[in-house]
């Protein structure tokens, strides 16, 4: 069973609960590091925990949500070995996996519909990394 780490700030709470329902229905184990309320909080406090879980291989992949998706992605990408992709349409999600071997999906909760967010999660989990010429490029990402 694949383990998925999920984290969010107050802007992503409602979507997170729906995503967790989807993941559990599909048979994934979920580590919920996000806030469970809509009370304002600082996204790095939960996003660092998701990135750490993926980094330490306690989770295979991560899903993070904040209002724009930018703060969450920037936070996650400070971790060595994390490739968090901010995606707002399904083609970007697909390419992030195929070409960039993204291991965390950052969803801009205030800019996409719940239906789209759930589609992004499905695409993220089911799209393999193509490797080949893309592997060389991905290997050049860390400094």
Image (cartoon, rainbow, N blue to C red):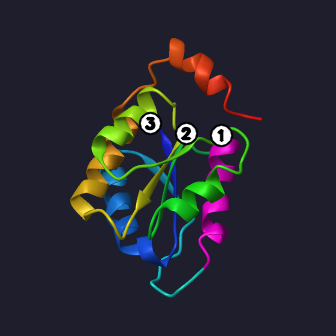
Residue 143 % position (x, y): 77, 35
Residue 91 percent coordinates (x, y): 30, 38
Q: Which residues are magenta?
A: 42-57
Q: Is residue 80 above or below residue 18?
A: above
Mark 3 to mark 1 CA distance (whole Å) = 20 Å
Q: Which residue is mark 1?
A: 57
Q: Are marks 2 and 1 in contact (CB under 8 Å)?
A: yes
Q: Which residue matches tag 3?
A: 96
Q: Is residue 35 visible?
A: yes
User: Which secondary structure type mostly characterizes the magenta part of the structure?
Assistant: helix
As measured in the structure, the alpha-carbon distance from the residue carrying label 2 to the one carrying label 1 is: 6 Å
Task: Please identify the residue farthest to the left as the structure is shown.
Answer: 115
Q: Which mark is residue 60?
A: 2
Instruction: Name the outermost residue toward the top.
Output: 132
The residue depicted at 65 percent of the width and 68 percent of the height is: 44
Secondary structure of the residue carrying numbered label 2: loop
Circle 2 packing at 10 Å, graded few (<14), some (14-19), many (20+), is some
């Amino acid at each position: 069973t694949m383990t998925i780490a999920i984290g969010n700030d107050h802007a992503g709470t409602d979507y997170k609960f729906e995503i967790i329902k989807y993941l559990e229905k599909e048979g994934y184990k979920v580590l919920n590091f996000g806030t469970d309320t809509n009370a304002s909080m600082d996204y790095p406090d939960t996003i660092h925990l998701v990135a750490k879980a993926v980094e330490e291989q306690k989770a295979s992949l991560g899903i993070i949500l904040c209002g724009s998706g930018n703060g969450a992605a920037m936070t996650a990408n400070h971790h060595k070995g994390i490739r968090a992709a901010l995606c707002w349409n399904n083609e970007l999600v697909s390419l992030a996996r195929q070409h960039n071997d993204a291991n965390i999906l950052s969803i801009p909760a205030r800019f996409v519909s719940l239906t789209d967010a759930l589609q992004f999660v499905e695409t993220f989990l089911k799209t393999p990394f193509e490797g080949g010429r893309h592997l060389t490029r991905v290997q050049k990402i860390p400094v």
